[in-house]
Amino acid sequence: MSSHQIVPSDFCKAGEILEGSLPVSGLERLASACADTTGEVVWKVVGSLDIHQRPRLLLSVSGDLCLVCQRCLDVMPFRLDTETAVIVTFSEPEADEVESALDDDDRTEVVVSDGKVDVMDLIEDEALLALPLSARHDVCPDKEAGRWKEKKASPFAVLGQLKRGNGNKK
Ligand SMILES: [Zn+2]
């Protein structure tokens, strides 16, 4: 896997953009949260400075994943589509300061880095944060199949009755 190391302060000052895609199997932590590692994650990182001239990375991650339903343990398709802003600070005290100023803005995160940052780590963190804490089907497949059969059976039964009805009339 190619490395995507950036120096956030330079990257953001220059307003750079990095984007790409990679198979789920290339992201070890994400892959272990999935039922299988098929599929692809599309990502984009846009650098800018916030109103306080701090490096700000806008991360977007999307892709179709297969999670495991915690109720029936069957595969559950999940559409990953998330966008988060990350403010890069140089020290823990600065991070605390920024975090408290952000209040409860949960679309913005704060990370500490005094050097290079691996974009892939940020992307994977974002993807993991966007997963449901407990993945569950709205309706688990077995129950759904049962309902579908019932629904499917009734129109034929009705049709059969109509045909018989018509036949009697003639
Ligand atoms: Zn289920």
Image: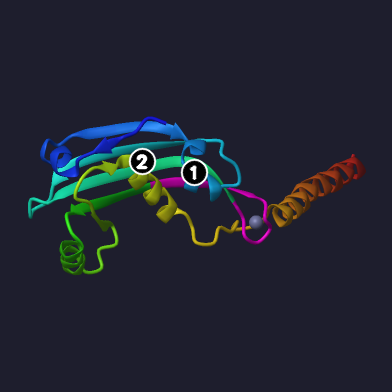
Q: From the viewer's perspective, is residue 42 above or below residue 105?
A: above
What's the image's color scheme?
A: rainbow
Q: Amino acid at mark 1?
A: Glu
Closest to the observer, 84 or 96: 96
Q: From the viewer's perspective, is residue 31 above or below residue 17?
A: below
Q: Which residues are the magenta region? A: 68-81
Report the side of 150 relative to 77 (left or right): right
> Is disc 1 surrounded by few (<14), some (14 to 19) or many (20+) residues within 10 Å?
few
Closest to the observer, 152 or 49: 49
Report the side of 158 relative to 11 (left or right): right
Quarter of the figure with residue 94: bottom left
Q: Amino acid at mark 2?
A: Met
* Residue lying at 16% horizontally and 55% vertically, measured from the top left: 90
Q: Secondary structure at mark 2?
A: helix
Find residue 18 and report its horizontal and vertical position in percent: 27, 33
Q: Is residue 90 magenta?
A: no
Residue at the farthest right position: 168
Q: Secondary structure at mark 1?
A: helix
Find residue 66 and report its horizontal and vertical position in percent: 57, 45
**Which comes before the other along the chain, label 1 or label 2?**
1
| Disc 1: which residue | 28
Find residue 89 and report its horizontal and vertical position in percent: 18, 55
* Residue lying at 67% horizontally and 51% vertically, measured from the top left: 74
* Residue lying at 20% horizontally and 52% vertically, measured from the top left: 88
Residue at the farthest front position: 115
User: Residue 120 has which mark?
Assistant: 2
